[in-house]
Amino acid sequence: MSARTSSDTASARSLRIYRELNNRERAGWVLGLTPAQAVACLALVAPVLLSLSAGRWVAAFGWLLVDGLLAALIVVPVRGRSAFRWLADLIFFQTGVLMRWSLWQSKAATGLPGPRDEPDLPGVLARVAFPDGPPFRDQGRLCLIHDTGDGRWGATARLTHSGVGMLSDAECERLAARLGNLLIAIGHREVVDRMSLLVRTVPDDGTEYDVWRTAHEHAGAPDLARQATDELDATIGSVSVRTELFVTVSGTESALRRPAAAAGGGTAGRAAVLYRVLDGLDDALKSLGIRSVSWLTSAGMAEAIRTGFNPAAAAVLTNQHLTHQQVAPAGAAPGGGSVGLPLAAAGPTFAPTPAARAYHHDGFSSVSYAVMMPEAGTIFGSLGPLLAVRTAGERRTLAIHYEVLSARAANRAVQSNRFRNNVMTDWKANKGFNTTAAEHRKAGGARNQESAVAAGHSMVRFTVAASITVPAGWNLEDHAAKLENDASGRFRLLRLELAQDSAFVAAALPVGIGLPRLRGALD
């Protein structure tokens, strides 16, 4: 996670370069240690000093060995986490495996299905409810996302976009500026503060084409033409890939409570407040090149989650949409509900105990990563290679989660960042130490960031997650290595070990989960 990036202009290409400011949450103050780590180290040193002052040399040596090992567990970072955090996570992970807490099977698979509108989902998704809101324009009753763990309400839309691969540098620059304006606009609203963009590649199984060809094929077509068409279908169709694009916006319960009470309270009141925001987001999203924005009903949300867990289910659902006209149940009010896949069937049928380095679900296996931004900076559209499918049948996903901080939180964050940089710079100057180039850059970035916030710009927390999914019989590590190769030289991928099930939700499912709750001011 990082704070808002600074930007400048590349002289060669006139493109905005986004550079990381290393404004990590809970950043280290004392020799790179957080205050909690520094206090823990001082507490470990105390027994050694007391033993030395009392002349107990053997006891002091014993304390030194024990405390040195504990200090290493607390201080030494290993792939994004301290050694102590790794040990704690491993203990919790193995406890869940031994107690069979992480083994999951759907109610339908056990022969005890629940109500159609009751979601049956594993892991972190078990805390999420999907109530239906009132009708929204002509799109029916939208499916709201209620994250009871974080206390958030949101909604998801399916977008259609032609992509940025064929756009010029100037067009990419305009899209980058418009995305920034959209985030600023979200920051000026008091209801929503998060936006998540999710892109999924979809292996094109040719279902839509087969349905169209069946309906339009001429019975008297020459055999040679049929043979040539079949060969082209087999050659081109096997490597065809489509993309799905989703956006999720959400706000906190505390921000929604008062306006929702004025709108009638309950789920309907919260939906009414969210709808006012969604109504104004369509134009802002279309300024980014989005051709259509379709907010999901419960059936649409169920399909988005189901195809996330099981990419092969997309063919059946597509065929059903194209060949079977869905009719609302008798007696249902117009817009009174959604038809199609029920929420009870949204999750996987079976998900075995997650492995430490992978997640297995419904005959597929996935590996998920956190994408770390490079120090040298990146440009708009540079994440595209992570979605470049290398083998027919694999699926890649990329999710970017944004949270726009309030003006008060942003001011507090930049002041804390400036104060910390000033303290460290002054202390080094007084002790005669030279300041490194990286510290100079961080100090300059902190000043620029403070100026931007003072001028009315927003500060944004963000995180990027990516995943790759292949059939369970394939060599998963080979395909994971291909994704890592595509990121090599551009980004650093951090494999989220011991948390692959939760990482999969953040990287592949459009429910807005993926950015941890902010605790205290952003450092």
Image (cartoon, helix red, strand yellow):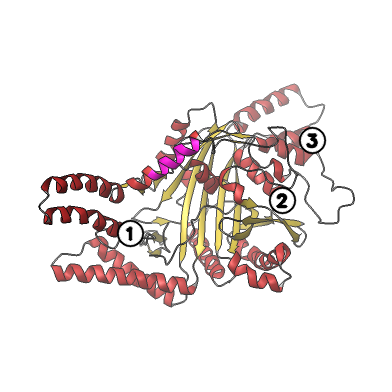
Q: Which residues are magenta?
A: 88-97
Which residue corresponds to mark 2?
298
From the viewer's side, name the closer residue of 241 and 246: 246
The circle on residue 36 is 1
| Residue 163, placed above or below residue 450 | above
Any mark on residue 216, and which? Answer: 3
* Mark 1 crowd level (few <14, some 14–19, many ≥20, 10 Å Cα): few
Q: Quadrant of the N terminus?
A: bottom left
Residue closer to the observer: 349 or 438:
349
Q: How crowded is the residue under tag 2: few (<14 C-alpha within 10 Å), some, or many (20+)? A: many
Dot 1 or dot 3: first in sequence order is 1
Q: Picture coordinates of residue 63 (x, y %)?
A: 20, 47
- Residue type of the residue flagged with mark 1: Ala
Type of the residue with mark 3: His
Q: Amino acid at mark 2?
A: Ser
Earlier residue among tags 1 and 2: 1
